[in-house]
């Protein structure tokens, strides 16, 4: 297995594309199956036992909500996928 390079990116999507991705994610969560997505050219597979949470941050100039999905890899490397909306 090749070593995974650390990564921390944000990718903007159109509303139409985001809705399509969120619907696929919701279907996988509901069915208890893995979720596959490509983000900025890299394919990511989220296992069905991933932890899902929602984070809300508020600052002086804006707010942010992140829908986070976290899981551990076999080598104990933690990866996360955050779908972010900045108000």
Image (cartoon, rainbow, N blue to C red):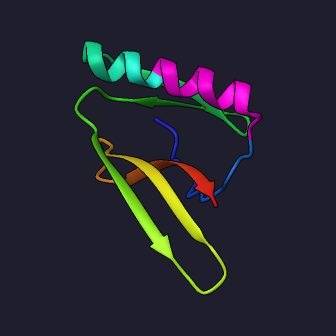
Q: Quadrant of the C terminus?
A: bottom right
Residue 39 in percent (x, y) is at: 65, 37
Q: Residue at horizontal 67%, vertical 81%?
A: 61
Residue 22 within the segment the image draws in magenta: yes
Residue 59 position (above or below residue 22)? below
Asked where in the image residue 13 lies, by quadrant, the reply is top right
Q: Residue at horizontal 31%, vertical 16%?
A: 33
Residue 42 in percent (x, y) is at: 65, 35
Q: Quadrant of the N terminus?
A: top left
**In the image shown, does 1 or 23 lie closer to the viewer?**
23
What is the total number of numbered labels drawn onto the structure image? Answer: 0
Q: Is residue 69 left or right of residue 10?
A: left
Residue 81 position (above or below residue 18)? below
Asked where in the image residue 25 lies, by quadrant, the reply is top left
The overriding secondary structure of the stretch rendered in magenta is helix
Asked where in the image residue 7 lies, by quadrant, the reply is bottom right
Residue 84 within the segment the image draws in magenta: no
Residue 33 position (above or below residue 68)? above
Residue 66 in percent (x, y) is at: 48, 55
Q: Is residue 75 left or right of residue 8?
A: left
Q: Residue at horizontal 64%, vertical 60%?
A: 86
Region of the chain picked out in magenta, as a range: 13-24
Q: Is residue 85 left or right of residue 66?
A: right
Q: Residue at horizontal 25%, vertical 18%?
A: 32
Residue 5 position (above or below residue 24)? below
Residue 16 in percent (x, y) is at: 72, 25
């Amino acid at each position: 297995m090749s070593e995974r390079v650390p990564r921390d990116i944000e990718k903007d999507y159109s509303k139409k594309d985001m809705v399509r991705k969120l619907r696929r994610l919701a279907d996988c969560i509901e069915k208890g199956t893995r979720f596959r997505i490509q983000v900025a050219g890299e394919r990511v597979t989220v296992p069905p036992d991933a932890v899902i949470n929602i984070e809300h941050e508020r600052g002086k100039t804006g707010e942010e909500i992140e829908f986070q999905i976290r899981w551990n890899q076999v080598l104990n490397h933690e990866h996360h996928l955050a779908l972010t909306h900045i108000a």
